[in-house]
Image (cartoon, helix red, strand yellow):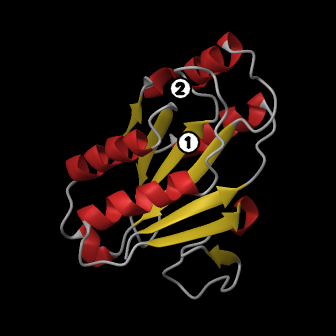
Amino acid sequence: MPNVIVIRNEYPDQGSLGRVLNYVQREPIGGGYAIDPNYAFEQMMLVKNAFYKTDGVQLKHFIVSFTNSEMGTLEFTDLMNLGFKIGKCLQDYQMVYNIHLDSNHTHLHFVMNTVSFLDGHKYGDGLAGFKRICTHLKEVFPKSRVGLFQTDSYNLFNPYTKDKKGVFQDLN
């Protein structure tokens, strides 16, 4: 089952944005929606400054994780296309995504700017936007159940293992 894991954190300053982007983009395979990933920090800050929205929560960080059987049906180009289509689910916001291969399960990390590049409104959809992502994943993986979870950044885990059981909230 593909899982969408929302990382619950305030990410209150520009330093947070830079640190999360550096972490997510440490893997060389990635892309962006409405942004050049090579200049993600600069372009996200440009949008925030243009609309005078430099305070408050700076980003949304989430992961889409796959089982080995699901990965057996996907190529890297499929993952890149999926990353872009997930960006379209939250279409008013710049988004960077990277494939991470550093665990037992391949996963995509996403960093979304919380300020719309279209009109400067701050992200206010809460979990509704992530439920749209789940709906899209159900179309891509019609035989799979899609999970939606939320966890604190310091409890980041792999939901397929028994490690740290109980540190995430199932939002299904």
Residue 79: where, in percent of width, then height?
29, 52
Residue 29: where, in percent of width, then height?
36, 42
Look at mark 1 in the image and give the residue it sits on.
111
Q: Which residue sits at x=53%, y=77%?
A: 159
For label 1, count other residues whose C-alpha is less than 10 Å away and answer few (under 14), some (14-19) or many (20+): many
Of 33 and 134, nearer the camera is 134
Mark 2: which secondary structure?
Answer: helix
Type of amino acid at the residue the image marks with label 1: Val
Type of amino acid at the residue the image marks with label 2: Ala
Q: Is residue 107 visible?
A: no
Look at mark 2 in the image and give the residue it sits on.
40
Q: Which residue sits at x=64%, y=39%?
A: 123
Mark 1: which secondary structure?
Answer: strand
Q: Is residue 137 above or below residue 31?
A: below
Q: Which residue sits at x=49%, y=36%?
A: 95
Q: Would you identify the image quadrant in which residue 157 lies?
A: bottom right
For label 2, count other residues whose C-alpha is less than 10 Å away and answer few (under 14), some (14-19) or many (20+): many
In the displayed structure image, the side of residue 89 where residue 17 appears, left or right: right
Q: Is residue 47 visible?
A: yes
Q: Is residue 14 above or below residue 111?
A: above
Give yes or no for contact between labels 2 and 1 (Cβ–Cβ under 8 Å): yes
Residue 86: where, in percent of width, then height?
39, 47
Of 140 and 77, nearer the camera is 140
What is the spatial separation of the Cα atoms under label 2 and label 1, in whole angstroms?
A: 10 Å
Residue 168: where, in percent of width, then height?
67, 75
Q: Which residue sits at x=75%, y=63%?
A: 154
Closer to the chain start, of discs 2 and 1, is 2
Q: Quadrant of the N terminus?
A: bottom left
Q: Is residue 81 above or below residue 74?
A: above
Given the current orientation, which residue lies at the most extreme top position?
50
